[in-house]
Image: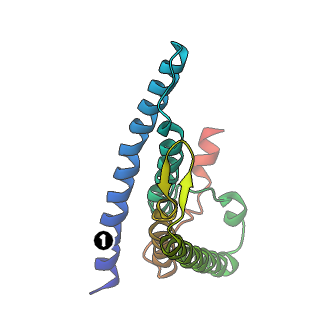
Amino acid sequence: MSLETFDRGLGRVVGALVWIACALIPCIFTMIVIDVSIRTIGFTPPLFTSSVVEYALLYVAMCSAPWLVREKGHVAIEALVTFLPPAVREPLAKAVYLACAVLGFYFAYLSVELFIEAIQTGNLDVRGIDMPYWLQFLPMPFGYGLVGLEFLMYLAGLRHYYTYDLGEVKDSV
């Protein structure tokens, strides 16, 4: 299997995850509106709303992070990089890709350890409702691991994170 084929498959997985994140957002919105509306008319809202919304926000972040890397949606200070000479710019970009990939895999590793520990202990996250503690660690290995893979694709030269073009900055100023 070629690297391009792997990247296309990775893109499909990342695309599916971002659609999950997109589906969660209106659910979060609806739960908050219902909770606030019930509270406003003087009744007691469901106890689970806050806990479920907090978990859903974590899932949105972890499901969308790899897509943001793929689509260059994370913050980058491109103006500084653009003014560097090409002999410095390219190695610096490769070093950044490598550092980001290593950190993504490291955080994935740490979150796998936390996930396994949470399963072994059987602890519950006690809030409005009792939820298995491992649920908050479940999306992290996938999100961080896929972020690491996306940065590896940049490192391999399949894509470039930086455009080295200030035209869009100049046009919008």
Residue 124 lies, in percent from the top left, at 53, 59
Residue 31 lies, in percent from the top left, at 44, 32
User: How many marks do you count on the picture?
Assistant: 1
Q: Quadrant of residue 67?
A: bottom left
Rendered residue at 53%/14% (across/down): 42
The C terminus - image quarter: top right
Most foreground residue, 130 or 100? 130
Question: Of all residues shown, which one is farthest toward the bottom?
Answer: 1
Is the residue 171 above or below the residue 145 in the image?
Answer: above
* In this rendering, position of residue 126 left or right of residue 3: right
Most foreground residue, 99 or 78? 99
* In this rendering, position of residue 143 left or right of residue 78: left
Q: Quadrant of residue 83?
A: bottom right
Color theme of the render: rainbow
The N terminus - image quarter: bottom left
Is the residue 133 above or below the residue 31 in the image?
Answer: below
Under mark 1, the amino acid is: Arg
Residue 134 lies, in percent from the top left, at 49, 64
Is the residue 76 above or below the residue 104 in the image?
Answer: above
Rendered residue at 42%/76% (across/down): 158
Q: Give the residue pinned by disc 1.
A: 8
* In this rendering, position of residue 82 left or right of residue 143: right
Name the element at disc 1: helix
Residue 82 lies, in percent from the top left, at 67, 64
Is the residue 133 above or below the residue 2 in the image?
Answer: above
Rendered residue at 73%/62% (across/down): 80
Rendered residue at 32%/78% (across/down): 6
Most foreground residue, 34 or 161? 34
Q: Residues within 10 Å of mark 1 (few under 14, many from 20)?
A: few
